[in-house]
Image (cartoon, rainbow, N blue to C red):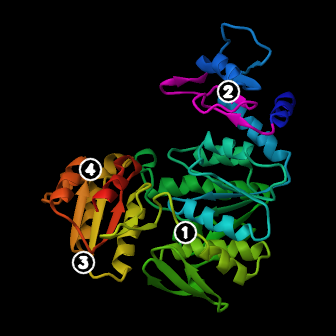
Amino acid sequence: MNKLYSIYLDANGSIYTDTRKPQPGAIFFALKGAGFNGNKFLKQAIEQGASYVVGDEHPDFISEKVIIVDDVLTTLQNLASFHRNHCKTKIIGIGGSNGKTTTKELLKRVLSVKYKVHATPGNFNNHIGLPLTLLSMPVDTEIALLELGTNQKGDIEQLCNICQPDFGLITNVGKEHLEGFGSVEAVAHEESHLYNFLLMHGGTAFVNVDDSWLGNMSKRLSNKVDYSINDFTAEQLAPQIKANSNSNIVYDANLAGKHNLSNIAAARAVGLFFGIAEAEIATAIASYKPDNMRSEWRQTGRNLIFLDAYNANPSSMEMAIHTLQTVQADKKIAILGDMFELGDFALSEHSAVLQLAQHAGFDMVITVGEVFAKVHSSPTSFLDVKSLISFLEQNKISGYTVLLKGSRGMKLETLIPHL
């Protein structure tokens, strides 16, 4: 590993895994997965100017630039851990069912007031994305914010072993990936591995005490900092939250939904812990504007869109529906797309979300997707986005505040041009 790490440093920490996006001078890691095998592109990567290529299958050519290992993914993960241990960076692991990315982005702005911060880009929060995030971290980084995602048992434990967090924060426990976990109890057990790692290694947890799961899970922790939305008084203004802390500092956040108070409270608690003045924390939080289809407001000219269509599970659906309820608007429409990875819970959870939306007082509830179609017998139920687009072209919607919420695969953002 020492030799590979030396090569990594000589390459200025540049690595890549896709020959369609070549990086001359970088190290190419030939990852394998369902339907692809990076070992087939070792020669191409060298021709593109890679300094070295790392594979786990012997190629049919000879080159001093080829490094053969037992398993490329394991090597990538081990190299990431090796790099982490050669840096003096404080690692904050961020887990939870909902709100990880928003919390990370708020923390990034808050902590950057005083420290050199590195953070997970996009959704690089799995067994491949996490090591890539670590390996893109400059040596002089003071604090790294790393999202820890999961969709099956064992993910969080593996990610903690790779990044070895000094601090941890679980946003909440909810109905995520029920197809893989089977119950919220199993989700809680999976997320608890972050707390377990901190407990075993003397780390510190920031605990959302408003979440009963987290309150119980954190009881064994000796090093923890509690936070709560009760640290604020707040009101929902479209499209922002205005909150006053118990220190009389005003937070004007470009966020929708009072559930985001938990994310603000987390950023405040972490910022204060790391010695940042609360007035500076509030200013940093105000500078964040959601994008990438996460709690994002868009004005189309005809309608105000609340775009929260990056992903969805029953818990985040409930939050989005409640957010639309609280927004001050004369006319409201909820457009809800299928939620994926619910397994045997799919019909019951879609039915529950539909009932919640139908009793929320909206002018119209529109559903899209095969599962919602099974529980929603209505002229405003559509099997796919294409059918809904045809409806919207014939029935122009104007003057509404419109929620778009669904799983990533539904691609509800394609509806925006027709709204």
Q: Estimate the spatial distance between the alpha carbons at disc 1 and disc 3, rounded to whole Å.
A: 28 Å
Instruction: Compare residues 291 and 232 and report the one nearer the observer.
Output: 291
Residue 102 position by quadrant: bottom right
Type of residue at label 4? Val
Furthest residue in direction front, as rendered: 301
Q: Which residue is mark 4?
A: 385
Q: Estimate the spatial distance between the alpha carbons at disc 3 and disc 4, rounded to whole Å.
A: 24 Å
Near mark 4 (Cα within 10 A), the count class, few <14, some 14-19 or many ≥20, is: some
- Quarter holding the N terminus is top right
Residue 150 position, x and y percent, is 54, 48
Type of residue at label 1? Lys
Q: Is residue 164 left or right of residue 385?
A: right
Q: Estimate the spatial distance between the alpha carbons at disc 2 and disc 3, rounded to whole Å.
A: 53 Å
Q: Which residue is mark 3?
A: 361
Q: At 60% from the left edge and 31% from the top edge, which residue is drawn?
A: 18
Near mark 1 (Cα within 10 A), the count class, few <14, some 14-19 or many ≥20, is: some
**Is residue 162 in sight in this rendering?**
yes
Q: Which residue is mark 2?
A: 72
**Is residue 339 in sight in this rendering?**
no
Residue 260 position, x and y percent, is 51, 73
